Image (cartoon, rainbow, N blue to C red):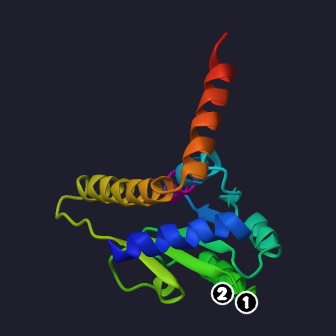
Amino acid sequence: AETIDGVAGAIGQAGQIGKVFSIGLGADDIFARGFALKLWLLGILTVHNFDTARMTANVSAASAGDVLLVFSEHGNHQALCKIARYFRERRGQVITVTRHTANPLRTLADIALVVSAHDELPYIQPLLYQSALQHLLDGVFVQLCEGHDDRHAQLLANLDRIQLMLEP
């Protein structure tokens, strides 16, 4: 609970004074992109990318108070580690989302959101990981909504606008 509060607090603070950067590669991008969409709906400026070269260029615009969310199940991708280091040089705060295992990316985190989901069956383990990760992200989203009437109002306004766009 403390970690979820910390992640929500860091994102909320960045949403007020700066921006949130979000990256994930491969299957991790599904969660990075989905969470970025939820942040956009709350009116939090979010820079999402799934390309490491483009994210490296985007990170050059980072400053103190900004947050980088790095989604990497195993936390071993060297390019993501380099982006996290570069972001910290820009004095931003790095939040990693990885499995609950020791990994290089997690060592670079200011806040590490960890997913504990294990099973001996290879077709069950990814399902458990994805479910647990979605549950954690939903918890962060709820924290960002609760107690913040301005964000809640922005969410409702954006959902209404989207619904109007989808209607014929």
Query: Total number of numbered labels?
Result: 2
Which residue is disc 1 drawn over? 89
Question: Residue 6 location in percent, x, y?
Answer: 46, 75
Q: Is residue 95 above or below residue 136?
A: below
Q: How far apart are the alpha carbons under marks 1 and 2?
A: 6 Å
Task: Please tell me whether mark 1 or mark 2 is closer to you in this view.
Answer: 1
The crowding category of the residue bearing disc 1, from other C-alpha atoms within 10 Å (few below 14, some 14 to 19, many at least 20), is some
117 is within the stretch colored magenta: no
Q: Is residue 130 left or right of residue 155?
A: left
Q: Nearer the viewer, residue 159 or 61?
A: 159
Q: Which residue is drawn at the image coordinates 61% and 50% (left, top)?
A: 150
Question: Residue 3 location in percent, x, y?
Answer: 39, 75
Q: Which residue is drawn at the image coordinates 73% and 82% (left, top)?
A: 64
Q: Secondary structure at mark 1?
A: helix
Q: Which residue is drawn at the image coordinates 71% and 57% (left, top)?
A: 45
Can you see residue 52?
no
Which residue is disc 2 drawn over? 85
Question: Residue 26 location in percent, x, y?
Answer: 54, 57
32 is within the stretch colored magenta: yes
Residue 123's disc is none
Q: Is residue 56 above or below residue 145?
A: below
What span is in magenta?
A: 28-33
The amino acid on which the numbered mark 1 sits, given as a three-letter code, is Glu
